Image (cartoon, rainbow, N blue to C red):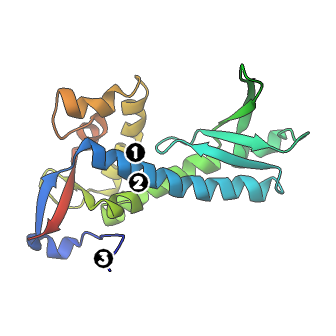
Amino acid sequence: MAPIFHRYHFDQKRYYRLHPASIRDRIMAQLIDGMILGFICSGLFYMFSDGNLYSVWVSPMVPQYIVEAAAGYSPDPADFWWGGYYGTFTLPYGKTIHLSYPSPLLWLIYIIYYAGLTGVYGQTPGKMAKKLVVLDSAQNRISGAAAVRRWLGYLVSVLPLGIGLWWKISVAPGQTWHDAISRSQVYMFDRS
């Protein structure tokens, strides 16, 4: 049986063939990472609220959540540190949703997940599942500072309606804005 996760071993890089990763593979890796982060952060919502609050949707790159709250539950100002605040909206068909504003704890989890894993392994679990690795211009591991710049660059890529992500397709094949900011490239790898 083939393994689900494929680690890139920097000490064996001469045995790998690298190809620029497709936008489809990168999106799939982000969705896998989003599911993992959603599971972690939803568990935190549930645990810290004593079962009164849980997440029903997660944004893969930025800690923005749609949450479900038990009837009568309202956030306490102290909840900001772990769950943020949430705004309540009623949809036209009567469903009430709560949109969580990111908390410091969730921002910390995201930066450790994305920047920490990318700086240490060159991959997040989503990238491992899709056989992707983040490398610098010399095809080496990116530095911790570059990994942090890369994650902050996600925000720059996403804010203008995601133009920084789609840039890869139309203008600069192989590179998104956060790749350019961190001077990195995402590659698909296989054994040669």
Separation of disc 3 and disc 1 at Cα? 30 Å
Closer to the camera in the image, 8 or 91: 91
Separation of disc 2 and disc 3 at Cα? 28 Å
160 on left or right of 50: left
Which of the two labelled residues, at mark 3 and mark 1, occupies the earlier sequence position? 3
Which mark, by number, is residue 2?
Answer: 3
Looking at the image, is 55 positioned above or below residue 15?
above
Residue drawn at (82%, 39%) of the image: 77
**Contact (CB < 8 A) between labels 3 and 1?**
no
Separation of disc 1 and disc 2 at Cα? 6 Å
Q: Position of residue 30 (x, y in %)?
A: 40, 48
Closer to the camera in the image, 168 or 180: 168
* Screen quadrant of the N terminus: bottom left
86 on left or right of 3: right
Looking at the image, is 4 positioned above or below residue 100?
below
Are there few (<14), some (14-19), or many (20+) residues within 10 Å of tag 1? many
Looking at the image, is 159 positioned above or below residue 34?
above
| Farthest-out residue, top | 92
Q: How many marks?
A: 3
Amino acid type for the residue under numbered disc 1: Trp
Q: Which mark is nearer the camera, 2 or 3?
A: 3
* Screen quadrant of the C terminus: bottom left
Amino acid type for the residue under numbered disc 2: Ala
Q: Could you tell me which secondary element the residue under label 2 belongs to?
A: helix
Which of the two labelled residues, at mark 1 and mark 2, occupies the earlier sequence position? 2
Residue drawn at (35%, 58%) of the image: 118
Q: Could you tell me which secondary element the residue under label 3 belongs to?
A: loop
> Mark 1 sits on what residue?
151
> Mark 2 sits on what residue?
115
Looking at the image, is 73 positioned above or below residue 95?
below
Q: Position of residue 14 (x, y in %)?
A: 8, 71
Q: Position of residue 10 (x, y in %)?
A: 20, 70
